Image: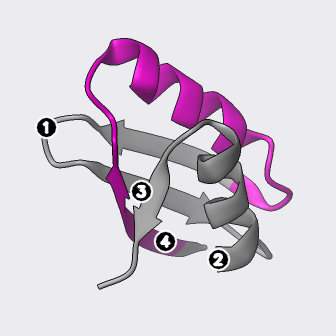
Amino acid sequence: MAEKIYQVEGMTCGHCVSAVTEEVEKVHGVSEVLVSLEEKTLRVSGEGYSDEDVVAAVEEAGYEVVVA
């Protein structure tokens, strides 16, 4: 199972965490989503998902993935 961590900008509250979690859980191949408001991170586990799909889901929720 692959695991990736993304930096997410714009999250300020629990609703933000819920919105990002709900959208990313819809991505094909994602089996687990863990969002940290304090660290502004999104940890995604699964098989067969793409970075593009995860980024699109975060944007759909109204936030931005920061590329390091």
Residue assigned mark 2: 51
Q: Is residue 24 magenta?
A: yes
Give residue 52's quadrant in the image.
Answer: bottom right
Amino acid on which the number 3 mark rests in the picture? Arg
Residue assigned mark 3: 43
Q: Residues within 10 Å of mark 2 (few under 14, many from 20)?
A: few
Would residue 23 be seen by someone viewing this image from the given angle?
Answer: yes
Q: Residues within 10 Å of mark 4 (few under 14, many from 20)?
A: few
Would residue 50 be seen by someone viewing this image from the given angle?
Answer: no
Amino acid on which the number 2 mark rests in the picture? Asp
Question: What is the number of the mark on residue 38?
Answer: 1
**Disc 1 vs disc 2: Cβ atoms closer than 8 Å?**
no
Give residue 24's quadrant in the image.
Answer: top right
Amino acid on which the number 1 mark rests in the picture? Glu
Q: Is residue 52 above or below residue 18?
A: below
Q: Is residue 38 above or below residue 54?
A: above
Marks 1 and 2 sit apart, C-alpha to C-alpha, by 22 Å
Q: N-terminal of the two: label 3 or label 1?
A: 1
For the C terminus, the quadrant is bottom left
Q: Residue at x 45, y 73 (%)?
A: 4
Q: Which residues are magenta?
A: 3-30
Q: Tell me the SS state at disc 2.
A: helix
Q: Name the foreground residue: 34 vs 14.
A: 14
Q: Position of residue 3 (x, y in %)?
A: 49, 71
- Colouring scheme, one of rainbow, by chain, secondary structure, one colour: one colour
Q: Name the foreground residue: 18 vs 29.
A: 18
